[in-house]
Image: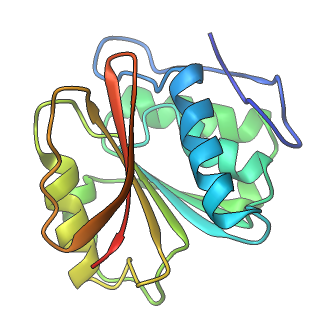
């Protein structure tokens, strides 16, 4: 069962997409990731975030629960998009959310960079590194943007455009926090 860990919606349950197409980030992994971010940025108050390869939308919704001003969710799986929209509706968070039914790798340029990008692509594909390098070129990422990439614990993320700030293994996952190089 997925739930919001902290903030305004603490303890609220989230629905996960049906089927095996997505792998929701485990509560323990999310807890580790958010504690890593809090130790670096302090507060989420007023931040603009994107949850890419969003699945259930748990990462973006967790950021909103902790005070982020806006979250963009990008997902291409139909069941996952239904779960994201259902979770947003259950939390009455529609005004703070934008859901894009698309592949992260087809996103176009953005008007201004975001504060935090969460990427949880399918393990073993390298899609996260490709997406990050592309999003740097398209203006989604500035020197002030924090990027969280979740991969399998045995994967070595190779992102040319960014430098690694920290890595943590949590179960079968590796969380890599980075900034634009």
In depth, the one of 15 and 112 nearer the eye is 112
Q: Judge whether 125 appears above or below 131 on screen.
A: above
Q: Judge whether 178 appears above or below 9 on screen.
A: below
Q: Residue at x 27, y 56 (%)?
A: 104
Percent across and percent down for residue 36 are 57, 47
In depth, the one of 67 and 169 nearer the eye is 169
Q: Is residue 138 left or right of residue 133?
A: right
Q: Please identify the quadrant where the C terminus is shown.
A: bottom left
Q: Please identify the quadrant where the N terminus is shown.
A: top right
Percent across and percent down for residue 115 are 55, 72
Percent across and percent down for residue 34 are 62, 44
Q: Quadrant of residue 32?
A: top right
In depth, the one of 70 and 95 nearer the eye is 70
Q: Quadrant of residue 33?
A: top right
Instruction: State whether residue 119 appears in this view.
Output: yes
Q: Judge whether 32 appears above or below 128 on screen.
A: above
Instruction: State whether residue 93 appears in this view.
Output: no
In depth, the one of 36 and 84 nearer the eye is 36
Q: Residue at x 82, y 23 (%)?
A: 11
Q: Residue at x 66, y 33 (%)?
A: 87
Percent across and percent down for residue 100 are 43, 57
């Amino acid at each position: 069962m997925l739930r919001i860990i902290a903030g305004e919606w603490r303890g609220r349950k989230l629905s996960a997409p049906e089927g095996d197409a997505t792998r929701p980030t485990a509560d323990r992994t999310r807890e580790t990731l958010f504690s890593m971010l809090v130790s670096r940025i302090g507060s989420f108050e007023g931040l603009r975030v994107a949850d890419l390869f969003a699945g259930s939308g748990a990462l973006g919704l967790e950021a909103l629960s902790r005070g982020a001003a806006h979250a963009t969710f990008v997902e291409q799986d139909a069941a996952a998009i239904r779960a994201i929209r259902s979770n947003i509706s259950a939390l009455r968070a529609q005004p703070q959310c934008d859901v894009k039914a698309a592949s992260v790798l087809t996103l176009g340029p953005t008007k201004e960079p975001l504060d935090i990008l969460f990427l949880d692509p399918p393990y073993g594909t390298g899609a996260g590194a490709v997406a990050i390098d592309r999003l740097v070129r398209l203006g989604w990422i500035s020197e002030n943007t924090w990027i969280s990439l979740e991969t399998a614990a045995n994967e070595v993320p190779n992102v040319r455009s960014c430098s690694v700030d920290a890595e943590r293994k949590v179960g079968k996952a590796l969380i890599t926090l980075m900034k634009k190089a």
